[in-house]
Image: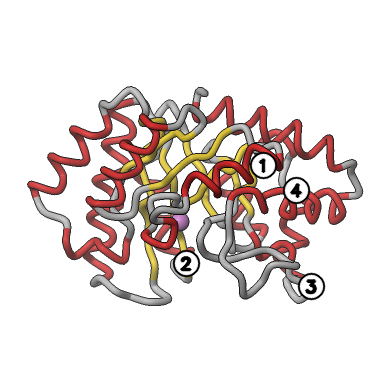
Amino acid sequence: MIDSHAHLNDPAYQNKLPEIIASCKEAGVIAVINVGYDLESSRRAVEQAHSWDFIHAAVGIHPHDAASFNEEVAATIRGLAYDSRVVAIGETGLDYYRNQSPRQCQQEVFRWHLNLARELRLPVIIHDREAHGDTLRILKKIKPGPAGGVMHCFSGSWEMARDCLDLGLYISFAGPVTFKNATRLREVTKRIPLERLLVETDSPFLSPEPYRGQRNQPAYVDRVIAAIASIRGLAEEEVRAATTANARRLFNI
Ligand code: NI
């Protein structure tokens, strides 16, 4: 299994990484994409990817932190992006749920990341929360580059998923697909072509059932796979094999 989106760089894991990684290995997680959300976490993602073979890094500024973006931040992220352990740009996107940075500013920083990903031929990791319209509008204007990208922790409608698929993007699902009340999301999950599906934990957040309320970890990605298999009426092994192959293809690992 590959956890296509986790934050092992989060302070919640400080000094706990050896045990988190041991449980990954025990569970059969063969790779984790360790995603940056600000400057510090992007740097840490790269450092950790150098320390552990199966950790790969993504660097970027989360929409929450878009207001902190300036030329110096841009230059640092760009510099990090050239590191051999960096496999993607992100996470970037729009978050109109928390609105921690002004919307205009989020949009501008999102565009910058899309252009950087295109220039460096790296896939882009997109965060979209309650901002489906603007996310799509920007994506249709600045199309993802040759390396494509992924809608992480997808929460939109089937119509939105279809537009994202048309743009060549992968669709990634996290813990919420395991929630019994996520009826609409489960319907969307059913319709994504298997070869465009990714799984993730978004650790340390969003623990899947039956771990809700506990701290999440990449080993729990097996619960996301199990939920998708059951929703689609497939064997877990089939979903595991497909999502692993998809993550390898997208991130070139
Ligand atoms: Ni995330």
Query: Distance from label 3 to label 1 (Cα)?
Result: 20 Å
Q: Residue furthest left?
A: 72
Q: Earlier in the sequence, mark 4 or mark 2?
A: 2
Q: Earlier in the sequence, mark 3 or mark 2?
A: 2
Identity of the amino acid at label 4? Ile
Residue under pointer 1: 197
Residue 225, disc: 4
Using the image as rendered, state which of residue 174 and residue 32 is in the foreground.
Answer: 32
Secondary element under disc 1, as helix, strand or loop, is strand
What crowding class fits label 2: few (fewer than 14 Cα within 10 Å), some (14-19), or many (20 or more)?
Answer: some
Using the image as rendered, state which of residue 16 and residue 106 is in the foreground.
Answer: 16
Q: Earlier in the sequence, mark 2 or mark 1?
A: 2
Q: Earlier in the sequence, mark 3 or mark 1?
A: 3
Residue under pointer 2: 129
Identity of the amino acid at label 2? Arg
Location of residue 136 (image quadrant): bottom left
Of the 4 image quadrants, the one containing the N terminus is top right
Q: Is mark 2 within 8 Å of ligand 1?
A: no
Identity of the amino acid at label 1? Leu
Q: Is mark 3 within 8 Å of ligand 1?
A: no
What crowding class fits label 1: few (fewer than 14 Cα within 10 Å), some (14-19), or many (20 or more)?
Answer: many
Query: Distance from label 4 to label 2 (Cα)?
Result: 22 Å
Measuring 39% from the left and 67% from the top, which residue is drawn there?
A: 95
Using the image as rendered, state which of residue 6 and residue 100 is in the foreground.
Answer: 6
Identity of the amino acid at label 3? Lys
Query: Distance from label 2 to label 1 (Cα)?
Result: 19 Å
Residue 180, disc: 3
